[in-house]
Image (spheres, rainbow, N blue to C red):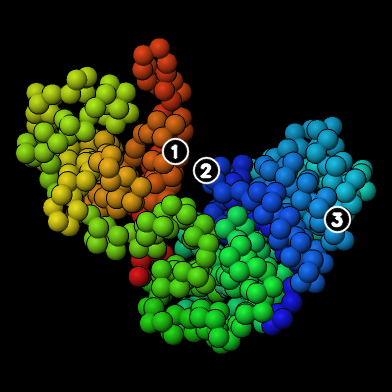
């Protein structure tokens, strides 16, 4: 076997109760992929055969799959493996409840419980859940540590925190959300990987996708496809693209080897540059730079080649936006097929049934000088209309506007066209129109739209509960916004393919 591992860390699910800025794997409440018990036990059995001695259950938040983790932990123990759990303690709402969650782990002989502190990442972090978990784990005699990153936790429990505060690593979401404001190092000084030993990694991560990740988003191979032993047998860090360049000279060597021009003058750390280069190379080395989740993409987005690392490339290569005119009326009328659809797409702007008179009134403000509204059709490169969107309430004094009435032709959905055409509209908003803020409202059940807006960097600001009455029910609205600096930072990080 070319390389041996002592530990396998299962990314049981990418779903999490939080969406922390420092998360390497873009965990969030919207993430969907979760390992099945069959996947976990299968890899545990293979791990045992390959000499692995310990497994960890991480995420995301692994206790969101609590019964599955318990069953997998039991399976690991029955095969003589030790196990640990990393958790954000969302479940420790009281010491009594924390005991209910922790006692089954104690009975299984857990070797380590690592509990996350949010002292550094959450302003005025209320560590009550952490305190409850630490107190209960201590009472149960459970081997436990508090993961402190960036700043020490303050729990008023003597000896509970190590004082060994870890550094922030700027990969995954941290590279996008945190790193730009902390960049002090020129790219040509980033010539090592300070955190991973690719020749003797010791442990690797496996998630719902089966990728054996040496670093988050850098795969040695897929254990679901080839089996763990085969992946470890075939792994050669000096031959595997991307890894061999990082081993030879860190992220700077990776950038040099593949002709990547750094997008910034300064970087927060090695991971910051590494993540930028890897994002740019992802489609060139899909077997190595995997899973897509670690690059902020759903599997669906990755499959449709709509990646967060090439917003502009996607936009320019698959779709373009053009002014909406009277000639577009018949098509838009054909797309508006029901009162519910009309409400979901346009809110109270139109009355059912949609007709030309309403569209005339809708178009009229675009002829004012300056127009308070711009409306576009989106079309593919052969000129076939595939979508519709607008910037409304363009306020040049406050430099703001509302992105609204985004629609992708029903037969064209699932290809990332919505994301591409919104990216073009944002380029106009923050470019030609010189805006500072673009906001939008979306119904809370429209999960695919929310995921799209999240991936473009929109920040969720709040919920208007039961804001729209539709028949006998009420729909709630989520408000989101994106600022010009956030858009530019995102482009700086993500452009480059
Ligand atoms: S430099 Fe790259 S390979 Fe090394 S830990 Fe950071 S992101 Fe991973």
Residue 30's label in the rendered image is: 2
Would you say residue 156 is visible in this rendering? Answer: no
Q: Quadrant of the N terminus?
A: bottom right
Q: Position of residue 46 (x, y in %)?
A: 74, 65
Image depth: mark 1 or mark 3 in front: 3
Tell me the SS state at disc 3: helix
Decide if residue 343 is on the left or right side of residue 474: left
**Residue that carries the numbered disc 3 in the rendered image:** 77
Mark 1 or mark 3: whose residue is earlier in sequence: 3
Can you tell which quarter of the image residue 192 is in? Answer: bottom right
Tell me the SS state at disc 1: helix
Tell me the SS state at disc 2: loop
Q: Position of residue 216 (x, y in %)?
A: 59, 65
User: Is residue 448 or residue 225 the one in the foreground?
Assistant: 225
Q: Residue at x 13, y 52 (%)?
A: 383
Q: Position of residue 31 (x, y in %)?
A: 54, 46
User: Does 279 appear above or below 303?
Assistant: below
**Residue that carries the numbered disc 1 in the rendered image:** 447
Give the Cα distance between marks 1 and 3: 38 Å
Give the Cα distance between marks 2 and 1: 8 Å
Decide if residue 366 is on the left or right side of residue 175: left
Mark 3 or mark 2: whose residue is earlier in sequence: 2
């Amino acid at each position: 076997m070319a390389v041996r591992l002592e530990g396998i860390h299962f990314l049981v699910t990418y779903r999490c109760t939080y969406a922390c800025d420092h998360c390497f794997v873009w965990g969030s409440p919207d993430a969907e992929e979760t390992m099945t018990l069959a996947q976990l036990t299968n890899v545990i059995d293979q791990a045992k055969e390959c000499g692995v001695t310990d497994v960890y259950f991480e995420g995301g938040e692994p206790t969101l799959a609590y019964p599955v983790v318990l069953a997998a932990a039991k399976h690991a123990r029955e095969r003589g493996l030790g196990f640990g759990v990393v958790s954000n303690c969302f479940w420790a709402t009281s010491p009594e409840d924390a005991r209910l969650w922790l006692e089954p782990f104690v009975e299984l002989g857990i070797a380590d419980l690592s509990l996350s502190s949010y002292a550094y990442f959450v302003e005025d972090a209320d560590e009550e859940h952490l305190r409850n978990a630490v107190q209960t784990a201590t009472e149960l005699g459970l081997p436990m540590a508090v993961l402190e990153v960036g700043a020490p936790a303050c729990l008023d429990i003597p000896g509970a925190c190590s004082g060994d505060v870890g550094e922030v690593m700027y990969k995954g979401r941290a590279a996008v959300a945190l790193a730009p404001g902390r960049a002090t190092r020129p790219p040509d000084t980033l010539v090592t990987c300070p955190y991973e030993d690719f020749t003797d990694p010791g442990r690797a991560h496996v998630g719902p996708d089966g990728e054996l990740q040496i670093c988050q988003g850098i795969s040695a191979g897929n254990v679901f496809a080839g089996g763990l032993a085969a992946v470890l047998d075939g792994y050669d860090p000096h031959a595997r693209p991307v890894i061999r360049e990082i081993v030879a000279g860190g992220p700077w060597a990776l950038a040099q080897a593949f002709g990547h021009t750094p997008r910034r003058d300064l970087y927060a750390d090695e991971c910051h540059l590494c993540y930028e280069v890897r994002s740019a190379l992802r489609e060139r080395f899909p077997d190595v730079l995997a899973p897509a989740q670690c690059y902020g993409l759903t599997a669906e987005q990755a499959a449709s080649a709509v990646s967060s690392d090439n917003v502009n490339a996607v936009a320019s290569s698959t779709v373009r936006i053009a002014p909406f005119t009277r000639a577009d009326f018949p098509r838009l009328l054909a797309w508006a097929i029901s009162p519910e659809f009309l409400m979901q797409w346009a809110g109270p702007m139109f009355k059912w049934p949609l007709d030309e008179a309403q569209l005339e009134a809708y178009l009229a403000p675009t002829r004012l000088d300056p127009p308070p509204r711009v409306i576009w059709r989106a079309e593919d490169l052969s000129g076939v209309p595939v979508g519709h969107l607008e910037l409304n309430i363009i306020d040049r004094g406050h430099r703001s506007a509302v992105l609204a009435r985004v629609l992708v032709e029903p037969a064209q959905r699932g290809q990332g066209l919505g994301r591409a055409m919104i990216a073009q509209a944002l380029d106009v908003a923050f470019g030609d129109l010189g805006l500072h803020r673009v906001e939008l409202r979306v119904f809370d059940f429209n999960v695919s739209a929310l995921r799209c807006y999240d991936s473009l960097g929109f920040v969720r600001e709040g919920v208007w509960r039961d804001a729209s009455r539709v028949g006998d029910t009420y729909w709630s609205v989520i408000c989101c916004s994106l600022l010009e600096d956030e858009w530019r930072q995102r482009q700086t990080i993500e452009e480059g393919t």
